[in-house]
Image: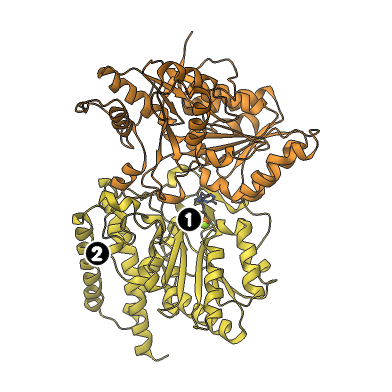
Chain colours: A orange, B yellow
Amino acid sequence: MSRSITYRDAINEAILQEMKRDERVFVYGIDVADHKRIFGSTRGLVETFGPERCFSTPLSEDALTGMALGAAVNGLRPILVHMRVDFMLLGMNQIANMISSFRYGSGGLVNVPLVIRAVIGRGWGQSYQHSKTMHASFAHIPGIKVVMPATPYDAKGMLISAIRDDNPVIFIEHRWLYDAYGEVPEEPYTEPLSQAKVLRSGKDITIVATSWMNVEAVKAAEVLSKAGISAEVIDARSISPFDETVIVDSVKKTGHCIVIDDDWIHCGFGAEVAARVSEQCFGNLKSPVERMGYAATPCPCARPLENLFYPNAVSLIKKIENKFDLEPIDLTGEDFYSYEKKFRGPF
Amino acid sequence: MSKIDRKELNLHLYKHLYLVRNAEEAIRKHYHEDEMKTPVHLSIGSEAISVGVCQAMQPQDQALATFRNHAVYLTKTGETDRFFAELYGKSTGVAKGKSGSMHLSAMDNGMICATAIVASGIPVAVGAALANKMQKNGKVVAVFFGDGATEEGVFWESLNIACLMKLPILFVCEDNELAVHAPNEVRKGYRSLTAIARQYRCHVFSDDTTDVEAIYHLTQEALYQMAETEMPCLIDLKYYRYLEHVGVNEDFNAGYRSRADYERWLKQDPVIIQREKLLSLGCSESEIRELERLIDGQIESSLAYAKSAPFPEPNQLHEDVYA
Ligand SMILES: Cc1ncc(C[n+]2csc(CCOP(=O)(O)OP(=O)(O)O)c2C)c(N)n1
Ligand SMILES: [Mg+2]
């Protein structure tokens, strides 16, 4: 029987089920056990497993990150949670210098099974220190996996995979997705940590999206279909490892590719996609791969500037209109997403 | 200090307290209109700390603050036009609407910055103090941070360097014994910050007063000792955060603290007790009212000005990234 739950609940269920299955799993981080429970995603954990396996910590991200490594190599499977990826940067030394190279440095003898969950995404004019995404920066470093599911189904399946994986996995969650509903099986299941996924099929153009940008891309695809353009939307899901097969197959069919990334463009994930597509679809491409992402600025607070900072369905539609030399599509009557009007799913 | 001096000093301090309190009360009043699209961490309850410390320093002395920075900004600048405009995301704001509530600054008034990443301003303050010392300009830096910031390694690294290098810096812990909703019991593996700090080569003070005049004098004493000995200073000042961690509402029903504590602290409310002190020092009710009326007027006109100011133009997005 199908069941629809939110992205928030999908994450929560994945952790609950894994903690039940495996008593080595524990959850910690700043405010994970307070009454707000990380936007509700750590609900019920203290009640079910006690404060030994779910606890709030001091504000000490650098130490907390190193502790994850120590606990992992000594037989546990820690899940460290950050309410914002921006705070996780205080642990960047442990991530880049210690965690990523530990297995390699042990000659492959010691595994590092840990998960770092980090929340990203727009809030209420949070400006430049609460709005980063950073997946490209993490993915740049060999030895860690980086995933960013967009649907409730993937959130649960990929989080379970991440917890069971014997490598460090950075698990990035966009807060605007938390209220999105989708079908999620009750029983535990795994989704691969290395595969892109087609969210919507099409034949004229391939749109590769990350995290929240999938919502914008699907919306754009719906609008474009009215103008006769059939867009395929692919959720990259796994930034590292990154298997381009699904994308390459799609571009071979469509001949066009746009990446809409939830991050800055320069030296970003879009560049990686563009490189792989040009390497493997050189003869099939009918236009250059294009990249969309954040403006090359710190994130501004003022809403009119913030709206320009982020790419969205409208800017994606405009890009594709240009690419195909279309008449401007009439967008009156279309409902787009904003802080006030969040996507609630389903995909 | 003569009685007249004392009265004047206290009037001066009250003016600042009243400005900070009522600017924030104005935010509380208008926030629900959803035009201030920025998260606000209000200072209500803590005003005596920012005002007492900053007013004891020289105007050219410098300060750095946290996301809970309105009080430091307002007392360093005394202005509300650019303040409210920033909260409304307008081009006339402190940072042309780019920064919002968590990052107010006013370099010309000595407010270097405010940061939303806990503890990240502390080493910046140390660097600023180093520059002041190297340039022999006599300026002192005060860095404000919450008790939660002392759990970050960089706090201790910074304190150590400041003590080692004998820098003119005042570490001010705005200590509400809470980090978001987490009390000390789940955050501290030691008994006393000040006891540890006393092992460092710096002066250490602590107080739980809400009397702005007392904090003013304590800071003056600290500054005097710093100058005499060429050592930094750490001051731990307790206060009670009246409202939720972020936002304009009370949150006593959230279950992590009790209204009874609030009511106990409210008896010592920094603004109310300062007003009472003024009366006891011989200020007349009408004199105080007149001063309050002026500030109310300033706030009202700044609010109106902010609301009517233009948003930044689209081309502003890409400006100011590089010099
Ligand atoms: C490095 C970092 N970690 C976590 C956070 C999230 N956060 C914001 S404020 C806060 C609590 C801060 O407590 P404290 O320093 O005592 O300041 P207060 O809010 O009490 O003024 C936390 C955990 C953050 N902003 N930065
Ligand atoms: Mg605090």
The quarter of the displayed image where residue B229 is located: bottom right
Secondary structure under tag 2 reads: helix
Determine which residue is flagged by label 1.
B261
Most distant residue in the front direction? A283
Residue A70 coordinates in the image, percent (x, y)? 74, 42
Left or right relative to A316: residue B162: right
Between tags 1 and 2, which lies in front? 2
The quarter of the displayed image where residue B296 is located: bottom left
Does the rendering let one see residue B182? yes
Left or right relative to B132: residue A296: left
Residue A94 coordinates in the image, percent (x, y)? 67, 47
Determine which residue is flagged by label 2.
B299
Is A195 situated above or below B224? above
- Amino acid at pointer 2: Ile
Tell me which residue sits at (61%, 22%) in the image. Answer: A17
- Amino acid at pointer 1: Asp
Query: Both on one chain, marks 1 and 2?
Result: yes
